[in-house]
Amino acid sequence: MVTGQRRDQNKRESWFVKNLTNKNLAIGDLATVPTFAPGQSHDILRFVSRERASHSTDLQSLLRINWVSLKKVDPNRTKQISNADESKSTLPATQDELGSGGGASSLADLTDVDLTGLVDANFLRWDATAGKWEPVASSSTVNDIGDISNVNTSGLQDGDLLVYDTGTSTWIVTSASGAVLTLDDIGNVDTSGKVEGDSIKWNPAGSNWIVSSDTFTSGDIELELEFKLTSLNRFKELLYTGDQLTTINIWETSAKIVKIFQKDLTYTADQLTQTLLTRISDSATLTKDLVYSGDQLSTVEVTKA
């Protein structure tokens, strides 16, 4: 039995970590080491093994940002060092004392990474069977749109477009001339022979839209022309029911505010099926019934009263 030895004397190697901040700190991956009060120092080897301390990544992080300092007892000491003499018996720790930086210094040091066969331009892919990240040739990397399996860029020329072909489930090249840029590019629209003022109307016989110069009778034209705003002395009032426009009122404001036209819109489900234009001065009306074929407007029937 050894006698005459103080209990605070320490024959072990000591690593003294000191809190350099003004707040409490803890070393997260060394849970058995007590929390450090501001300015407080602990010999962490009293609580964990040297191996665990040297591989503590949290300790390394705190050292890198200078939140703590680390000093060690001189390993060549020849006398017992008491805790009271800590400041006289310690020296700055060397890098070797911290193991391999407290953690991995390269990918190869990680236990779940296998770099066997690694060559230039490889990338790492997870292998669930091996439970490791392993190198894979970069041929799987998409460097060009043509590398994508469902894209065929054969015959690609300047200005071409990619369109999806449902028959082959592939994006294929098409000339920009096939893109819809004008009404004439739409397959069921024929605007040949159009002149200024023409409109297009549905042609049931040809199942297409064609140019039309159709007009109403003189009385109808007069009524429709009066409906148009020809000066700043008139304004439109738009009235809605829910999300649907149901009434358009035209007001005259040259002398006093007077409503001169009212246009009522009727819907069947979400389709506009009738418009009724009424001239307020004499109650003259112009009714348009809109007839559809499926979702397409096929006929407009006009009735004047």
Image (cartoon, rainbow, N blue to C red):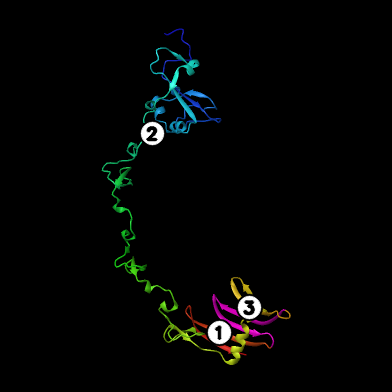
Q: Earlier in the sequence, mark 3 or mark 2?
A: 2
With 264 as the anchor, is 118 left or right in this view? left
Viewport quadrant of the N terminus: top left
**What amino acid type should be assigned to the residue bearing mark 2?**
Gly
Q: Position of residue 207 (x, y in %)?
A: 42, 83
Q: Which residue is mark 1?
A: 289
Instruction: Bin the neighbour count of mark 2 within 10 Å (Cα to Cα): few under 14, some 14-19, many 20 and up.
Output: some
The tag earlier along the polypeptide, 1 or 3, is 3
Q: Amino acid at mark 1?
A: Asp
Q: Which residue is mark 2?
A: 103
Tell me the amino acid under the disc marked 3. Answer: Ile
In this rendering, the label closer to the viewer, 1 or 3: 3
Q: Which residues are magenta?
A: 257-281
Residue at numbered disc 3: 248
x and y percent of residue 96 in the render? 37, 26
In the rendered view of the protein, which quadrant contains the C terminus? bottom right
- Say if mark 3 contacts mark 2, CB within 8 Å: no
- CB of mark 1 within 8 Å of CB of mark 3? no
Point out the residue furthest to the bottom here: 218
Residue 185 in the magenta stretch? The answer is no
Name the spot of residue 199 as percent of width and height, x first.
50, 84
